[in-house]
Amino acid sequence: MLKRKNPLILSGLALAVAIGLHTLNGSNTVVHAQDRAQNPNLKTPSTQTIADQFVVRAAINKTTQSFVEVFSRGDVDQVAAHQSDGAELISDEAPPLRGRDAIIEALTRHFAENPKKTIVREVESLRFKSKFSVTEEGHLKVSVGSEAPKNMRYSLDLIHEDGKSLIAGVHEWPSKNAELMNLEWLIGS
């Protein structure tokens, strides 16, 4: 005779995993919930897949936070270390750049001509495209000195290989609500 699992224990375990995933990326998005709502025929990920994603998610969060820090400092060598060989940088403000060397050449000029920036990253979602390929989306607040921050949307494509997460693509565009986000300080806490 089979024993029944206590549903309270299973629910608690599921909640602990969800909280752990939420805490790692600072987002309110649980990876599969939105996709499952749109497509109820999706398979439930295995425990091993969830464990793999937990490890990859931690590595990606570390990579993206580190990338923002080195970019803010204008450290071209460290920015290069975060890029894959075939990385792309696509922005509304400049022609697309393809390949790590082209990106580094452009950033070297950019950092020489522009002062260091403060960048705040607000992650909205993190989606696994495959076991080791992820897209992170959200908002960036970029400020120089005491200027009001410039708000923009971003999308990062990341790959995880050889135990390391690398940025394969950066896409930036103005936020539709950028003007309203600049008034966010009026709301208060």
Image: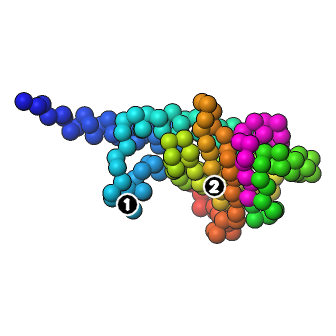
Residue 82 is inside the magenta segment:
yes
Q: Which residues are magenta?
A: 72-90
Left or right: 19, with 116 as reference point: left
- Using the rendered image of the protein, determine whether residue 23 is visible from the camera's viewpoint: no
Q: Is residue 40 above or below residue 108?
A: below
Q: Residue at x 14, y 34 (%)?
A: 4
Between 29 and 117, the one nearer to me in the picture? 29
Q: Quadrant of residue 173?
A: bottom right
Q: Residue at x 59, y 61 (%)?
A: 187
The residue at which mark 2 appears reads as 155
Relative image position of residue 119 (x, y in whole percent): 72, 48
Q: Quadrant of the C terminus?
A: bottom right
Relative image position of residue 171 (x, y in whole percent): 69, 57
Q: Residue at x 26, y 37 (%)?
A: 10
Residue 127 is inside the magenta segment:
no
Q: Quadrant of the N terminus?
A: top left
Left or right: 104, with 159 as reference point: right
Left or right: 129, with 3 as reference point: right
Amino acid bearing label 2: Ser
Indicate which disc residue 130 carries.
none
Amino acid bearing label 1: Asn
- Using the rendered image of the protein, determine whether residue 55 is visible from the camera's viewpoint: yes
Q: Residues within 10 Å of mark 2 (few under 14, many from 20)?
A: many
Q: Quadrant of residue 174?
A: bottom right
Q: Is residue 6 above or below residue 120?
A: above
The residue at which mark 1 appears reads as 39
Q: Of the residues under marks 1 and 2, which one precedes in the sequence?
A: 1
Left or right: 12, with 177 as reference point: left
Relative image position of residue 74 (x, y in whole percent): 83, 42
Relative image position of residue 23 (x, y in whole percent): 49, 39
